């Protein structure tokens, strides 16, 4: 069997184009379709399997009050508190207020939230004032959410699904987004998509870092698409590092963030090389309970390693050796066997953990209808900036994917009802030229360039930053930018990896510049952005940084936090 | 002298006219076949076509291929200090090298 490479540009028309089929994209598709819109759901990988949602093994924060009385206002207060003064309270309110409804709808669709006595179980997670986090056993929250949404997408009429479709650029006419140009990976053919409304739900940017917890397609595509289409991004300096990503021994077939649920259920002990608990030294005593927030745990582990008290691979030990085998088995069932297959016996040995790039608080600026500044362009899920301020609470990512996805789908369907197609082939020409380009540098090692970028970001734009480190990273990023050039590497054939890498690098380098530049400008430490040369919060920095693309230059400026604007 | 694995990888665009290329890959305990393939791309040949999303979690199910004639996920198959023969899935349409058309028909793009 072979696939004939297609040469002609293929064209499709839809009311609503959705880019990315994680939790946000799929919920948006369902909501837009049931509001009567035709939907084209595009994903660069397999539909509903490639995003961050499927990777989420943890929990979903939502004020259901199913076990302990709760109200979305309490959840909102915690979300705002975690955001260290930068939270867009309108977006945070949408997340907290619509969350319960989305979670109940997911329940009705059969996601299988863990239950006790018939009521949805809600676990405690750091930063929440009460048990608030629903989950699916065992370590199955993300896969169950993805599978449930895939099933509903499949049953909903009006949704066309298209995997292996890499969106290269949005298309604009008179400043309005009118669709997109994509590369069909399986054939190498260019595809144009005319849409009355376009939702970017392509997730975050964790692939910019060497060690990350997301999938290989989270390279900031959505941010780059929006930026090039004229939309501003906000808070790009706020990358969340997950403190206890798996480090050693080598563990395969498991997501590196898998230890968090163990911590929720069993506590566990974070230890240094001397097998001593150390978080108290940095302000939080644990005593076997899991109470330390992500930013503080990241700080404590990195400082302990710097002081020469790290574990052999440069992290900390996480130990469950004090937990009886039966308790481990009860809490984690078959996961214990998967660990055994990796020669890990938690009753007899600790594992090593270290901070790992996990989530991006920044993103495309949007209002509560999920509309951006650019007409025709909406955004959903992690691609949205602002809802989590300078630091995201555990459990808010899936909630925002669902709540923002649903809202974006509803708005897009409304816009499509009143709108008409304004797509013109002439507007798509430059992007088609990228997809079909011939004669790029044949010797460009695009895979190595991605590794170089990931190393520069990890070393210079990681959790702890200085002017010197940031400048060094920026120099590497700009060298890569020059090396990349204007003409895509690789050829027009099916699944040409150098062409795919080149297009990815075009996005990754642009987005890396926005992160490094925003981090350099913010001369204070707040939440996930920690400047060793500027410790502590500075009141004058209680502002969002907004970046725009002007030609090939990134323009950054400060702007009042959205909630304060609204209150005036 | 550290151990190496030899990955003998099927390359090509036409299932009737492919070739094998062999790569020596450094081997650390516990590594996956996907680790080895990613090493080849960054250090030997960036044109080698493979597909994966989740890297390590066995969540995306994209990295299916044949190892010594048996269908595996490259992210959970272990690298071993021997010759390991990798081919694309024989019962799926070939796209390139180790990449095959694995999506269900309803989820494929049709122009």
Image: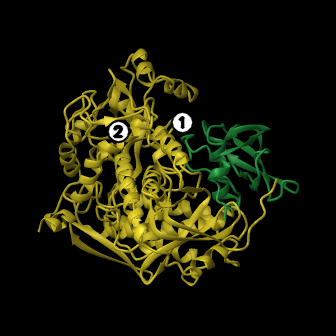
User: A96 and A555: which one is in front?
Assistant: A96
Which callout, 2 or 1, points to the residue nearer the camera?
Answer: 2
Instruction: Say which colour chain A has.
Output: yellow
User: A484 and A313: which one is in front?
Assistant: A484
Tags 2 and 1 touching, CB below 8 Å: no
Residue drawn at (44%, 36%) of the image: A111
Number of the label disc, if any, that sits on residue A251: 1
First of labels 2, 1 by sequence position: 2
Q: Position of residue A386 (x, y in %)?
A: 29, 60
Number of the label disc, if any, that sits on residue A23: none
Under circle 1, the secondary element is loop
Q: Position of residue A565 (x, y in %)?
A: 17, 68
Which of the chains is green? B
Q: Residue furthest left?
A: A568
Q: How far apart, in angstroms, are the residues tagged by discs 2 and 1?
A: 35 Å
The quarter of the rendered structure image containing the C terminus of chain A is bottom left
Q: What subunit carries mark 2?
A: A
Q: Which residue is mark 2?
A: A104
Q: How is the image coloured?
A: by chain
Q: What subunit carries mark 1?
A: A
Residue drawn at (19%, 66%) of the image: A541
- In the image, are marks 2 and 1 on the same chain? yes
Left or right placement of residue A489 versus residue A285 in this view: right
Residue drawn at (33%, 63%) of the image: A237
Q: Position of residue A544 (x, y in %)?
A: 25, 67
Quarter of the rendering containing residue B49: bottom right
Q: Is residue A210 visible?
A: yes
Under circle 2, the secondary element is helix
Q: Residues within 10 Å of mark 2 (few under 14, many from 20)?
A: some
């Amino acid at each position: 069997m072979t696939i004939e490479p297609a040469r002609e540009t293929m064209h499709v028309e839809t009311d609503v184009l959705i880019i990315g089929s994680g939790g946000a994209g799929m919920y948006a598709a369902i909501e837009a379709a049931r509001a009567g819109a035709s939907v084209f759901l595009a994903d660069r990988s397999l539909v509903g399997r490639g995003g961050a949602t499927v990777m989420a093994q943890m929990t979903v924060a939502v004020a259901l009050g199913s076990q302990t009385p709760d109200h979305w206002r309490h959840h909102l207060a915690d979300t705002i508190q975690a955001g260290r003064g930068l939270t867009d309270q309108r977006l945070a309110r949408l997340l907290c207020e619509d969350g319960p409804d989305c979670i109940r709808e997911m329940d009705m669709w059969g996601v299988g939230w863990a239950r006790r006595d018939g009521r949805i179980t809600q676990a405690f997670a750091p930063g929440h004032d009460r048990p608030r986090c629903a989950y699916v056993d065992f370590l199955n929250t993300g896969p169950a959410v993805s599978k449930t949404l895939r099933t509903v997408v499949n049953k909903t009429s009006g949704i066309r699904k298209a995997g292996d479709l890499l969106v290269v650029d949005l298309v604009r006419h008179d400043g309005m987004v009118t669709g997109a140009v994509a590369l069909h990976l399986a054939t190498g053919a260019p595809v144009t998509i005319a849409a009355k409304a376009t939702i970017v739900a392509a997730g975050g940017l964790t692939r910019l870092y060497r060690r990350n917890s997301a999938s290989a397609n989270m390279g900031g595509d959505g941010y780059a698409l929006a930026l090039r289409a004229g939309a501003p991004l906000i808070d790009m300096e706020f990358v969340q590092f997950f403190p206890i990503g798996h480090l050693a021994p080598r563990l395969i077939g498991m997501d590196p963030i898998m230890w968090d649920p163990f911590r929720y259920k069993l506590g566990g002990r974070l230890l240094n090389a001397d097998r001593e608990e150390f978080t108290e030294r940095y302000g939080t005593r644990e005593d076997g309970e899991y109470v330390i927030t992500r930013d503080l745990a990241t700080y404590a582990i990195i400082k302990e390693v710097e002081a020469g008290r790290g574990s052999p691979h440069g992290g900390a030990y996480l130990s469950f050796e004090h937990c009886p085998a039966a308790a481990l088995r009860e809490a984690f069932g078959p996961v214990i066997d998967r660990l055994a297959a990796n020669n890990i016996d938690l009753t007899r040995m600790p594992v090593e953990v270290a901070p790992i790039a996990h989530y991006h608080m920044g993103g495309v600026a949007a209002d509560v209808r999920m509309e951006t500044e650019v007409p025709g362009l909406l955004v959903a899920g992690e691609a949205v900036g602002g809802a989590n301020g300078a630091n995201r609470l555990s459990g808010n990512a899936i909630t925002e994917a669902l709540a923002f996805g649903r809202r974006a789908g509803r708005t897009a369907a409304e816009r499509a009802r009143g709108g008409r197609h304004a797509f013109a082939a002439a507007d798509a020409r430059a992007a088609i030229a990228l997809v079909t380009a011939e004669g790029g540098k044949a010797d460009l090692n695009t895979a190595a360039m991605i590794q170089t970028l990931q190393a520069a970001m990890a070393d210079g734009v990681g959790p702890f930053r200085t002017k010197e480190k940031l400048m060094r990273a920026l120099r590497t990023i700009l060298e890569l930018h020059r090396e990349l050039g204007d003409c895509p590497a690789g050829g027009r054939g099916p699944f040409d990896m150098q062409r795919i890498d080149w297009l990815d690098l075009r996005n990754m380098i642009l987005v890396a510049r926005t992160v490094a530049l925003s981090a350099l400008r913010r001369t204070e430490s707040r939440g996930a952005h920690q400047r060793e040369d500027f410790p502590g919060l500075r009141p004058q920095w209680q502002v969002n940084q907004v970046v725009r693309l002007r030609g090939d230059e990134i323009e950054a400026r400060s702007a009042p936090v959205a909630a304060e604007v609204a209150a005036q | 002298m550290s151990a190496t694995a030899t990955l003998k990888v099927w390359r090509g665009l036409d299932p009737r006219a492919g070739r094998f290329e062999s790569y020596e890959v450094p081997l650390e305990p516990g590594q996956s076949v996907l680790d080895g393939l990613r090493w080849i791309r960054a250090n030997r040949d960036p044109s080698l076509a493979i597909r994966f999303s989740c890297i390590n979690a066995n969540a995306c199910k994209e990295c299916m291929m044949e190892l010594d004639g048996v269908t595996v996920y490259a992210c959970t198959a272990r690298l071993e200090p021997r010759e390991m023969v990798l081919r694309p899935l024989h019962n799926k349409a070939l796209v390139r090298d180790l990449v095959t058309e694995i999506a269900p028909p309803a989820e494929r793009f049709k122009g």
